[in-house]
Amino acid sequence: MYSLTLNPLRCLLFCCAASLLAMLNGCGKPPSTLERIQEQGVLHVITRNSPSTYFQDRNGDTGFEYELVKRFADQLGVELKIEVADNIDQLFSRLGSAEGPVLAAAALISSPERLTHTRFSDPYLEVASQVIYNRNNKRPKQPKHLVGKSLLVLKGSIHASDLNALKKDLPALSYDVSDQVESVDLLRMVDEKQIDLTLVNSNQVAMNQVYFPNIRVAFTLQDSHQQRWAIAAGDDVSLLNEINRFLANAKKSGLLQNLAERYYGHVDTLGYVGAYAFARHLQQRLPSYEASFRDAAKKYAVDWRLLAAMGYQESHWLPTATSKTGVRGLMMLTQRTAKAMGVTNRLDPKQSIQGGARYIAKLIEQLPDSIYEADRLWFALASYNVGMGHLEDARKLTAAEGLDPNKWLDVKTILPRLAQKQWYSKTRYGYARGGEPVHFVNNIRRYYDILTWVTQPQIEGTSIASGTTHTPGFAPNNGTLDAVDPAITTQ
Ligand code: BLG
């Protein structure tokens, strides 16, 4: 028989058994990282301020990493808290700190060294690591041509690791690192011949080419670096599992593809000649029309930089421009559209800009409600160029292909079919040069992005005419390097 009298030893045994049971049942266990995030209602993320990660644009916070991590926070049902690291080393040391960020979303790439203090998610974007040179110098074609050149990369970056690895085969290779510069600064330094070469990711080259007409890709050093999110090392896999589930879904749902298309899909459209010309016209021509763009934008509640981007695509900001088909003026209005918009003289830049603004505002309004909010502007622009009837035809063909007629990414692949008889013969409005609106929208998006970057909110109000409008870190000749000692160390 068991006695019910509790002696101290029995009591101890009982307590141990009880706590073991409680542990097995999960109560009394410290919360996992994921549970803590959900309890606190905040996802604290560390990133970097750059065009390919996180920056401010016309709508506030934006950037590929920001948008992706925002969706993740939304899915967790928590608030997103963004912290910006000054450099890569700081990013990793903050990631491991108590009460610090739990996740780094900053276009990071895994490496054996980083794996000693960090765990990485599954990949979400593949980029190449490219050697950049100035087109007025001799092009290096292979790794051995890097020897004897001044070569600067970001301290702690994957590019520094790439070069370090290369040193094993090429002991004479020497390079410098700095944690006081950003990738855009490196590109500018090559552009201005302050250094011979640098190494940056392919997406950063593509996004910044327009600012730096002299930079060229020499060759690709590493063609498949996978970008991943990072969390601090440890045994708790709750957050990592949740991240990987989210990324797998983002791949499946097309979210990743959409983001890549939005941020990098239109970056190559200008080419070197176009990029160089745009930079020149921004200085020489836009100042004469900036006030007119701002006036019209205010009147029709659209962004003046969008109107300016349209004007550049239409006429390169030349008020007397005339197309082969007789379409005229800075905003290239047809006679019919000009009349409908109350424009009496298409060659008068003020009138042309007012007419174009009124027309695009009307088109945005007229689009069917089913078109996704984020894509409405692209559809309206396509319609500005090819007309609403042809756009409707393309949307119908898109649906018939089993694609989404409300998504620009889908419709733009189908629009060029309007120029092929087998397709246009089945449509209501018939033949149209369907490739034109696709280029039209791609280019305007690119110009719009650039104009947005060079007129960011903190310096908005200064006019391009004054020559003071520029974006710290993103635009050429912005003086950041004059103000900052690049603190270069030779490796
Ligand atoms: C656009 C009109 C649309 C019109 C379409 O043509 O012009 N847009 C404007 O006038 C602003 O209104 O749609 S419709 O009214 O529903 O028929 C279709 O007719 C102008 C386009 C045409 C294009 N640029 C604005 O983007 C142009 O000039 N193409 C010719 C190029 S080339 O010189 O022959 O190479």
Image (cartoon, grey):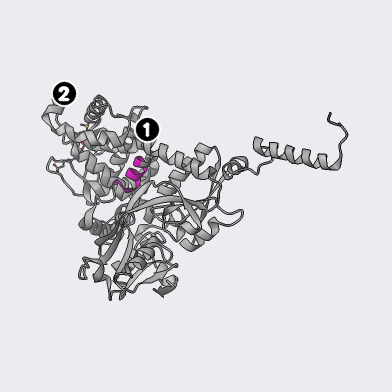
For label 2, the crowd category at 10 Å Cα-Cα, with few meaning under 14, some 14 to 19 and many 20 or more, is: few
Q: Secondary structure at mark 2?
A: loop
Task: Report if the beta carbon of the residue with label 1 is closer than 8 angstroms to ligand 1.
Answer: no
Q: Earlier in the sequence, mark 2 or mark 1?
A: 1
Amino acid carrying mark 2 in the image: Lys
Please state which of residues 294 and 55 is positioned toward the viewer in this rendering: 55
Span colored in magenta: 257-265
Q: Is residue 263 magenta?
A: yes
Q: Please give the residue where the numbered disc 1 appears in the rendered image.
A: 372
Question: Would residue 281 be visible to someone looking at this image?
Answer: yes
Instruction: Please name the amino acid that badge 1 sits on.
Output: Tyr
Reply above or below: 157 against 3: below
Quadrant containing the N terminus in the rendered view: top right
Image coords of residue 112 (percent x, y):
43, 59
| Residue at 28% across, 40% down | 356
The quarter in which the C terminus is drawn is: bottom left
- Residue 79's label in the rendered image is none
Ligand 1 position by quadrant: top left
The answer to whether residue 308 is magenta is no
Picture coordinates of residue 415, whole percent (x, y): 21, 34
Which residue is under mark 2? 426
Q: Quadrant of residue 154?
A: bottom left
Measuring from the top left, give residue 152's x and y in whole percent: 35, 69
Determine contact: label 2, label 1, CB under 8 Å. Answer: no
Label 2 and label 1: CA atoms lie apart by: 26 Å
